Image (cartoon, rainbow, N blue to C red):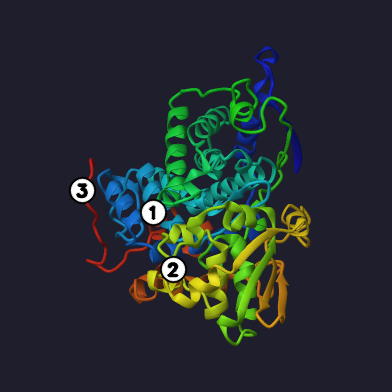
């Protein structure tokens, strides 16, 4: 990996394209290196993971809306939609919209956390949709997904967005555009323009993850993927982009991020270097914000030591800056303590999550968020006794570059009314690569079966698992097999809109 210095330049510098970050990203995307076997295997895992959570959310309201909108944009040789038969095809950008929303809705797929936050699996729906529509094979799709993950992880590792209240999908637009560029074998010049356009149109504020969190949290990544497809299409037709989009005087960095004195060091693979960033990402065993994964596992362990929840006087969670300020009491969001809050808000409340995990010793993507569960009086009472503080030790571990030190957990201290103290800590979730039970292919398949149980016919589930595990060798005409059809008549329809 090579570190690239990125800073704002006055227009008088006329920064050469080859020195611009967008060009360097495009050069990585156009570098046709072989995909490492372990990378290809992890890509398969993440395609399975995405399908699991997409089918589990197939009739939730945002997914119904997105699917209905996509079905209004049919194209015989287009891309497939989760839930529909493989012969149901729509324009690629609308497939990315519907499928990306289904993947994101439950907040239950993979994650990478560093200077910024991300769900790199959000790259899969737009890249897969374009692959299906343009007749690419599994090998091309695998190379493209390796690029999407690489670029997103490298940007997330080096450029912080949330400190400036910019939503993390601003890194997704460029990574998806770069991945599509790899997929189609486009020259560096075209990918360069597409990356810049994609960044320009996908910057938005973090209010989508603050206060009363709405369904837009699920739509935001699919919107970025949709816009990335459109950016590549325009660039292929010869259209340009605002440039230099990262380093210019009126650029994203200059006015939305660290400003005129900004200095970033962005790691990118050198020429001929394999794209392996997906191996640094991790998925979720539990359907909740990633920073809660280790704390959920810890709460399972600690809850067994409390005999009566009325005996609890206080629960303190010592954790990282991000956990405290985004999903903890440092966010100063009263909604995070509201039993009537939306599911989207509850899965961004570590206080609620820890309360339920302590009491239940289990976590379920539906039951743990059910209104009757959130309103249970003993849960509400415990929930409101939980608070978070930032501990610099956990913040330092959160930002560590050494994988053996990097951590997303914390320490939980339960104080009982009689003065007894129960305390314990956990650095990484059990499912993490360095956790107690690191996940492999069998775990991804187990998650798939658990989430799709009762939603799929057994033959369809087995068909998908057989096809997806051959992903790198799939013929172009087999890529449609990467969708999953639910039984006829089980897809819900929503209310009418414009389309």
Q: Quadrant of the C terminus?
A: top left
Mark 2–mark 1 CB contact (< 8 Å): no
On the image, the x and y values in percent for residue 222 come to 43, 47
Residue 412: name its quadrant: bottom right
User: Distance from label 2 to label 1 (Cα)?
Assistant: 40 Å
On the image, the x and y values in percent for residue 196 come to 55, 30
Q: For this view, does 172 lie left or right of residue 324?
A: left
Q: Residues within 10 Å of mark 2 (few under 14, many from 20)?
A: many
Element on which disc 3 rests:
loop
For image coordinates 68% across by 17% down, the residue present is 10
For image coordinates 24% across by 55% down, the residue present is 494
Judge whether residue 470 can be spotted in this image. no
Q: Nearer the viewer, mark 2 or mark 3?
A: 2
Q: Which mark is residue 369?
A: 2
Element on which disc 2 rests:
helix
Closer to us: 264 or 339 = 339
Q: For this view, does 405 lie left or right of residue 450?
A: right
Q: Quadrant of the N terminus?
A: top right
Give the mark, 2 or 3, whose residue is nearer the N terminus.
2
User: Distance from label 2 to label 3 (Cα)?
Assistant: 28 Å
For image coordinates 31% across by 66% down, the residue present is 486
In the image, residue 365 above or below residue 185: below
Closer to us: 223 or 273 = 223
Give the mark, 3 or 1, whose residue is nearer the N terminus.
1
For image coordinates 51% across by 74% down, the residue present is 363
Residue under label 3: 496
Closer to us: 63 or 350 = 350
Residue under label 1: 477
Element on which disc 1 rests:
helix
Total residue callouts: 3
In the image, residue 217 above or below residue 247: below
Q: Residues within 10 Å of mark 1 (few under 14, many from 20)?
A: few
């Amino acid at each position: 990996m090579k570190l690239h210095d990125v800073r704002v330049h006055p227009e008088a510098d006329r920064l050469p394209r080859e020195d611009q970050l967008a060009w360097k990203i495009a050069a990585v995307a156009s570098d046709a290196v072989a995909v490492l076997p372990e990378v290809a295997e992890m890509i398969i895992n993440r395609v399975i993971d995405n399908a699991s959570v997409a089918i589990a959310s197939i009739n939730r309201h945002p997914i119904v809306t997105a699917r209905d909108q996509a079905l209004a944009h049919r194209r015989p040789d287009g891309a497939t939609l989760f839930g529909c038969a493989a012969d149901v095809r729509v324009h690629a950008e609308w497939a990315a919209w519907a499928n990306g929303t289904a993947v994101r809705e439950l907040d239950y797929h993979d994650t990478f956390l560093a200077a910024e936050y991300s769900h790199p699996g959000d790259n899969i729906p737009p890249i897969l949709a374009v692959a299906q529509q343009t007749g690419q094979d599994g090998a091309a799709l695998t190379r493209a997904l390796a690029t999407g993950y690489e670029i997103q992880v490298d940007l997330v590792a080096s450029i912080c967005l949330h400190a400036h209240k910019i939503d993390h999908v601003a890194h997704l637009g460029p990574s998806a555009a770069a991945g599509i560029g790899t997929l189609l074998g486009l020259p560096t010049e075209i990918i360069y323009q597409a990356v810049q356009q994609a960044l320009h149109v996908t910057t938005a504020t973090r209010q989508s993850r603050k206060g009363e969190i709405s369904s837009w949290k699920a739509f935001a990544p699919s919107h970025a993927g949709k816009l990335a497809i459109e950016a590549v299409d325009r660039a292929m037709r010869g259209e340009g982009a605002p440039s230099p989009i990262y380093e210019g005087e009126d650029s994203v960095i200059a006015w939305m991020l660290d400003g005129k004195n900004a200095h970033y060091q962005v790691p990118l693979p050198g020429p001929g270097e394999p794209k392996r960033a997906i191996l640094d990402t991790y998925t979720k065993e539990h359907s909740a914000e990633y920073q809660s994964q280790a704390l959920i596992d810890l709460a399972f362990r600690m809850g067994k030591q409390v005999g009566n929840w009325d005996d609890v006087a206080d629960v303190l969670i010592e954790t990282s800056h991000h956990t405290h300020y985004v999903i903890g009491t440092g966010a100063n969001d009263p909604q995070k303590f509201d039993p009537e809050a939306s599911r989207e808000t509850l899965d961004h409340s570590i206080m609620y999550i820890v309360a339920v995990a302590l009491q239940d010793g289990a976590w379920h993507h539906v039951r743990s968020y059910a209104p009757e569960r959130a309103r249970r009086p003993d849960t509400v009472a415990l929930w409101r006794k939980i608070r978070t503080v930032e501990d610099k030790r956990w913040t330092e571990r959160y930002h560590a570059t050494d994988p053996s030190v990097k951590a997303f957990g914390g320490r939980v201290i339960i104080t009982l009314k009689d003065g007894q103290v129960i305390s314990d800590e956990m650095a990484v979730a059990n499912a993490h690569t360095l956790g107690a039970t690191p996940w492999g292919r069998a775990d991804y398949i187990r998650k798939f079966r658990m989430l799709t149980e009762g939603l799929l016919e057994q033959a369809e589930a087995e068909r998908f698992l057989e096809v997806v595990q051959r992903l790198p060798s799939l013929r172009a005409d087999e890529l449609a097999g990467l969708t999953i059809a639910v039984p006829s008549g089980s897809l819900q329809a929503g209310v009418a809109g414009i389309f």
